[in-house]
Image (spheres, rainbow, N blue to C red):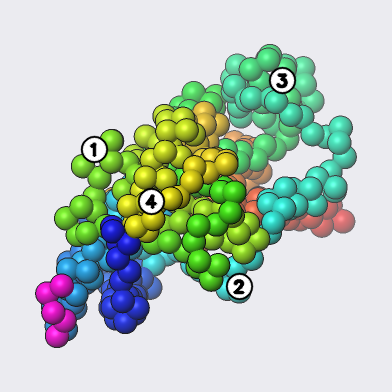
Amino acid sequence: MPGGKVIDEAVVVSFLKNYNEVIEECDAVFKEGRPVQPGDSAGDFIRQELPKQLALSNDIDAVKCTKMALLKHFLKLETCITGCHDMGEESLEYFGQYKELEGDHYNNPSGYNVILDLILKTIPPDCMAYNKKVQCIRWRGEGKKRSESAHSADGVEVECEDGQVFSADHVIVTVPLGYLKKNSRNLFQPPLPEEKLASIERMGFGVVNKIFLTFQKPFWDTDCEALHLVWDQDESNPKGPEEWYKKTYCFYIDSKAPNTLLGWISGREAEYMETLSEEEIADTFVGLLKKFTGKEDIPQPVRTMITRWGSDALTCGSYSYIHVGEKGDDINTVAEPLYRDNTEIPVVQFAGEATHSEFFSTVHGAYLSGQREANRLVNLYASSETSKS
């Protein structure tokens, strides 16, 4: 907390017991089919139910205030997990639809490139085309530029910004939901079905960014795993863009990068941070770390990096969440292929984390959705060969 105050571990443990019980109640709404109002949010539920539990304790007033400060702190954490700006945007009805992948977490020091490199080894280099921004996907006969193409009558054409056109029997679209939200009405010719467009509109897609501050040497204790920035209860929420930094709930320390702090920030504050220079960001966080540690001798970082997912024109954000008012079948509606007229043959398919009904917002969800669509084609052609024999 500000001034270098450290919250007593027993207070944190007691708070987390109550907090996790309320989160489990949120999960149970979906898993047990409990009735709720369509506009109910997970954030409102947590803000209403947790204070009721805290009021039953024999805590002194100072401890109760600290626990309310922890509530606001952990709600910031939840926004980084889910991807929303505020937990008031997260659907209570479908909060429990997300499924945790079993097994331990593992940080690969080489990054996601390792996975991509393994996949690329199985694909001939001449089958890959880079720096080809797609301008239009024509999935029916109208307006096609190459009617003489062997694929054009029943297949699909992909026109790039540089004018090159690729013809195919099937196309799998894997762009982020944020990109679809901004471009889906112009990207496809003819336009997508209204039902799919409505689902894209309803689904939630937010901005979550990471902050990396690398120092010459650590100023924190060697056994420290994280620096949680818990504001006093009445100072926790940003009062405007100039207080964007208050949305950063924590800096983590990874043993594989012991000189680096990794912070998370979500929502409109994450978007605002993208407008600032690395120098401005470094100055802000050094001041913040001094405020919370009570150490005035914290040096400037030797390197500052942030992600800028919100302003990236090809992503338009980070990952999806289930927004208040979203329908239960919206994810499956977006994932549903576009079929050749009067057949069950898909011409345009959709993959990406936002199309996985249990692992949305994750890389493994994106990966599995790609496998799902590839297997759809494998099964299509396998059944076709079987019917011929």
Mark 4 or 1, nearer chain start:
1
**Magenta range:** 58-62
- 61 magenta-colored: yes
Give x and y (percent) for residue 368.
63, 57
Left or right position of 382 against 346: right
Disc number lying in front (1 or 2): 1
Q: CA distance from mark 1 to mark 2?
A: 38 Å
Disc number lying in front (1 or 3): 1
Which numbered tag is attached to residue 120?
none
Mark 4 or 3, nearer chain start:
3
Mark 4 or 2, nearer chain start:
2
- Residue identified by numbered label 4: 296
What residue is rendered at 37% in x and 58% in y?
293
What residue is rendered at 51% in x and 53% in y?
262
- Residue identified by numbered label 2: 104
| Proximity of marks 4 and 3: CB atoms separated by less than 8 Å | no
Q: CA distance from mark 4 to mark 3?
A: 60 Å
Which image quadrant: the C terminus?
Answer: bottom right
Amino acid type of the residue that numbered disc 3 sits on in the rendered structure: Val
Q: Secondary structure at mark 4?
A: loop
**Looking at this view, is 167 or 154 the one in front?**
167
* Residue 320 visible in the shown view: no
Mark 2 or 3, nearer chain start:
2
What residue is rendered at 41% in x and 29% in y?
275
* Residue 259 visible in the shown view: yes
Q: Secondary structure at mark 2?
A: loop
Disc number lying in front (2 or 3): 2
